[in-house]
């Protein structure tokens, strides 16, 4: 596999510091010159890395304020497919569309966090590799309690609300949170990208009219030009 580009290595290390709390929320970072020297890269390389993290919602860069570590985005969403799809945008501000490249479905036991969310010990799951413009771009997993749906359709729409409607479920609403991650070795092989490539991680939870969780979708997006907002 090709050597990791310098700007990606810088992105990965900055994400690691933010996730670990070494760079806490609200921290003002040094200017590009100082950061470039610290990371051993050119100013242009550092500027590209900072722009990527800003697009991921991890940094806030405004004239007169410098670069600030931002709070993780957490916003409620309206229960419509158009609203959810519009949150992922490309460099031109257009909604991003994915297509299913490869998928597998199964049932499995819930882990501790999933049990706390659903209150159910068994889940129906589908894992899918998604393409965008013909290129591998994202990994997605959707979970639904087995008592609601015993098996999930691998070819159902990627959008969570549309996915649920295709399975006969009508969510009352969804909530979403966005964070950053880095590819594991398995992720990098699946996505055909470098190890430690920055990821935009989107976690969506759908709830019924009584506020009970009926689905969880986690999408890990590697496309550099995709942002949340």
Image: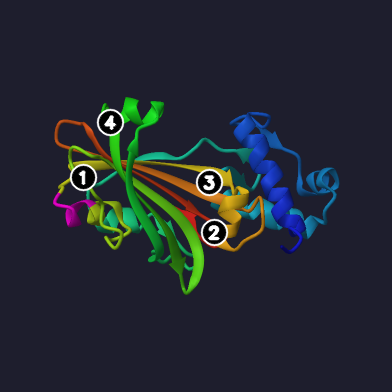
Q: Which is more N-terminal, label 3 or label 1? A: 3
Query: Which residue is identified by label 2?
Result: 190
First in sequence: mark 1 vs mark 2: 1
Mark 3 residue element: loop
Q: Which label lies toward us, 1 or 3?
A: 1
Q: Say whether disc 4 or disc 2 marks the residue closer to the N-terminus.
A: 4
> Residue 139 in the image: x percent, y percent?
46, 55
Q: How much space separates mark 2 and mark 3, taking CA atoms?
A: 25 Å
Nearer the viewer's eye, disc 2 or disc 3? 2
State the extent of the magenta-drawn residues as a range: 164-168
Of helix, strand and loop, which one carries label 2? helix
Q: Mark 3 or mark 4: which is in front?
A: 4
The answer to whether the residue labelled 1 contacts the one labelled 3, judged by CB atoms less than 8 Å apart, is no
Q: Position of residue 52 (x, y in %)?
A: 61, 54
Is residue 65 shown to the viewer in this render? no
Q: Residue placed at 18% from the left, 54% from the top?
A: 165
User: Badge 4 is on which residue?
Assistant: 118
Q: Are marks 3 and 4 in contact (CB under 8 Å)?
A: no
């Amino acid at each position: 596999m090709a050597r990791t580009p310098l700007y990606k290595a810088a992105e990965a290390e900055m994400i690691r510091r933010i996730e670990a709390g070494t760079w806490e929320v609200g921290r003002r970072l040094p200017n590009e010159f100082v950061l470039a020297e610290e990371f051993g890269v050119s100013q242009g390389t550092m500027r590209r890395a900072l722009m990527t993290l800003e697009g991921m919602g991890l940094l806030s860069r405004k004239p007169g304020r410098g670069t600030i570590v931002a709070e993780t985005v957490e916003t409620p969403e309206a229960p419509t497919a158009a609203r959810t799809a519009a949150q992922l945008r490309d460099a031109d501000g257009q909604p991003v569309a994915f297509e299913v490249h490869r998928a597998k479905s199964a049932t499995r036991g819930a882990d501790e966090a999933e049990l706390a969310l659903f209150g159910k010990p068994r889940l129906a799951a589908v894992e899918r590799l998604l393409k965008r413009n013909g290129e591998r771009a994202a990994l997605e997993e959707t979970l639904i309690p087995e008592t609601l749906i015993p098996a999930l359709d691998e070819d159902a729409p990627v959008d969570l609300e549309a996915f649920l409607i295709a399975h006969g479920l009508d969510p009352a609403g969804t909530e979403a949170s966005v964070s950053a991650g880095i590819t594991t070795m398995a992720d990098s092989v699946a996505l055909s990208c470098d190890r430690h490539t920055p990821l935009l991680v989107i976690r969506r939870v759908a709830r019924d009219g009584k506020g009970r969780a009926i689905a969880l979708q986690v999408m890990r997006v590697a496309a550099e030009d995709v942002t949340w907002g």
